Amino acid sequence: MEAFVAWCGFFGAWLLVAGPIYQAALELQEQDLERDRIHDVSQAVPKPPQVSVWWWLVPPVRYVLHHKQEERYRQAVLRALSAEDREAFVQFVNKATGWFLVAGGASLLALKETWELREHYEWPVAAFWVLAAVMAVLAASYTVGRIQRTERMLARSTG
């Protein structure tokens, strides 16, 4: 019975990873975001000059300078967007952030359950890493496969 419970915890936790990834892909795909207009605006706003490579001699300073330049550019693009496009973009980013947090929390639980499964069977630590990597790839692959299958089905029905 212990083995059954360990496997249930393991698979259940990894389903909690795959679910938010898939749901995020669906919702973000449906988001009414005028990608072309936002892309055009972002191309029209001049990009800031690159931070000098010499700042790599002091990596924390280079990071701060780069981050400040990127933030100024982001703000310039947001100011250049129409109010409607800005609202759609902010909603998109907020939704993506929410799903990232859910999937991140689920991933931590899945790693815990994977570790406990490894402990139950007294497998080597390498087995944990292999199992975690395989399950992460499977969770992401599920979403990719489902989205591609859906697109093919829709293309056939309209084509």
Image (spheres, rainbow, N blue to C red):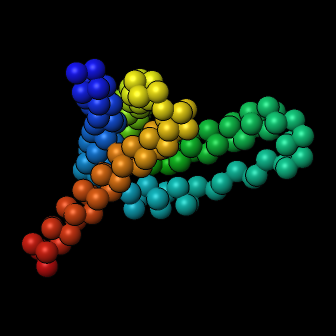
Task: Answer above or below: position of 153 versus 1.
Answer: below
Q: Nearer the viewer, residue 63 or 143?
A: 143
Residue 16 appearing in the image = no
Q: Position of residue 120 (x, y in %)?
A: 40, 24
Residue depicted at x 90% and y 40%: 57
In which quadrant will I find the C terminus?
A: bottom left
Task: Answer above or below: position of 121 versus 142.
Answer: above
The image quarter containing residue 114 is top left
Residue 57 appearing in the image = yes
Q: In this image, 9 relative to 128: left or right?
A: left
Q: In this image, 80 relative to 69: left or right?
A: left
Please count the marks in the image: 0
The image quarter containing residue 4 is top left
Q: Nearer the viewer, residue 11 or 85?
A: 11
Which residue is at the far left? 157
Which residue is at the far top? 2
Q: Position of residue 5 (x, y in %)?
A: 25, 23
Q: Position of residue 155 (x, y in %)?
A: 18, 72
In which quadrant will I find the N terminus?
A: top left
Which residue is at the far bottom? 159
Q: In this image, 82 relative to 27: left or right?
A: right
Task: Answer above or below: position of 42 versus 22.
Answer: below
Q: Position of residue 82 (x, y in %)?
A: 40, 48
Residue depicted at x 33% and y 35%: 14
